[in-house]
Image (cartoon, rainbow, N blue to C red):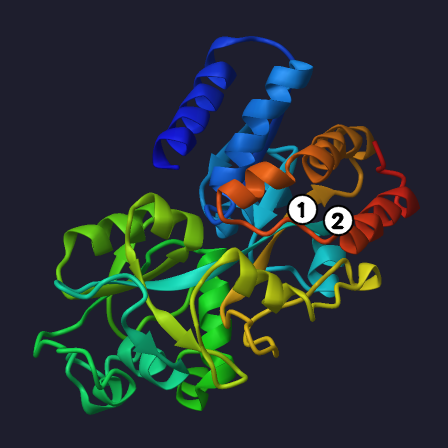
Amino acid sequence: MKKLLTGIITTAILTTMSIAGETINGAGATFPYPVYAAWAYMYYKETGIKVNYQSIGSGGGIRQIKNRTVDFGASDAPLPPEKLDEYQLYQFPAIIGGVVPVVNIPRIKAGQLRLDGYTLCHIYLGEIKYWDNPKIKALNPDLNLPHQKIKVVRRADASGTTAIFTTYLAEVCPEWKEKVGAGKAVKWPVGIGGKGNEGVANYVKRLKYSIGYVEFAYAKQNRLKYTLLKNKAGNFVEPSIETFKAAGATANFDPKKHFYLWMVNAPGEKAWPIAGASFILEARERKEVNKKVNRFFKWAFEKGDEIAIRLDYVPLPKELKEKIYKYWEEHDIAP
């Protein structure tokens, strides 16, 4: 998959840089970048229209669409309706994925280490300092965990991935909610900051005894060792298309609220606890630009599901796509 993904992204970037013509410009979340780049490459091949997407983080995407310097912004942290009204923006989801804890512990394989909300929270609070802490050992009685200090890695930039991760921690851990809270940028108690999902993945890859959090596609692309996580139903689940789908199955996106919704700690026997959607933001006064952008996303919704699945994302359910089409029609931005 890594060769395929790298080839698609490289070709998409070169195409955008080297050929003049109609271009759609977007910027924002790193979470969906692999699938947006793959969609852009296929869309260009079919239509000759280029989609230039800058992977700069959700905070940057929100800022650029607020300033009207791009045709669309992208954020994994949905904006509440009052903020959308203040900034005069539309919003709809485009893809579903999962944020996964990843570790670099010698002799521990992907999927072997079990964590729960308590241990993950207190690692990031800096209160669980060593891998052989009794709380971690209790979850992993069969693992020989080393007495090595945990090197915590987190995002340095304003990030939707961080918003999903910290919203989950605030949901399952009262101490986190009280001391740190949730958002695209928080005052981290501990940790080394990496820029983008790429930066966090690179740090974890290089640092022995580290832990970080990334979107699942980045974990797989970089061959990082993901953990199992205890979900709301009390089951330890593995990050996968199946468990992300299970988290999305109970999500009720409301068009009247511009689809504002968090998906963390979802109910369900198989639900992955740190799932989330990535959202598209558009300026309300730019009807014709929005129609052009939405033509691309309608193409992606109709022809891009297989690409999304291959890159370990969950395509939107058919019912949700239909809601988005009606939302576009109601606001006169349907392609």
In primary-sequence order, the first of circles 1 and 2 is 2
Percent from the top left, x then y, of residue 227? Answer: 33, 68
Please identify the quarter of the rendering in which residue 25 is found: top right
The label on residue 90 is 2
Where is mark 1, residue-wise? Answer: 281
| Residue 194 appears in the figure | yes
In this orientation, which residue lies closer to the viewer: 110 or 54? 110
Tag 1: amino acid: Leu
Q: Is residue 246 left or right of residue 220?
A: right
| Amino acid at dot 2 | Tyr
Frontmost residue, 201 versus 115: 115
Residues tagged 1 and 2 counted as in contact (Cβ below 8 A): yes
Q: In the rendered view, tell whether residue 198 sits above or below residue 237.
A: above
Tell me the element at label 1.
strand
Residue at 80% over, 39% down? 285
> Who's the residue at 60% across and 33% down the image?
69
Q: Position of residue 66 (x, y in %)?
A: 63, 45
For residue 138, what is the image quadrant? bottom left
Rendering coords of residue 244 (x, y %): 55, 62
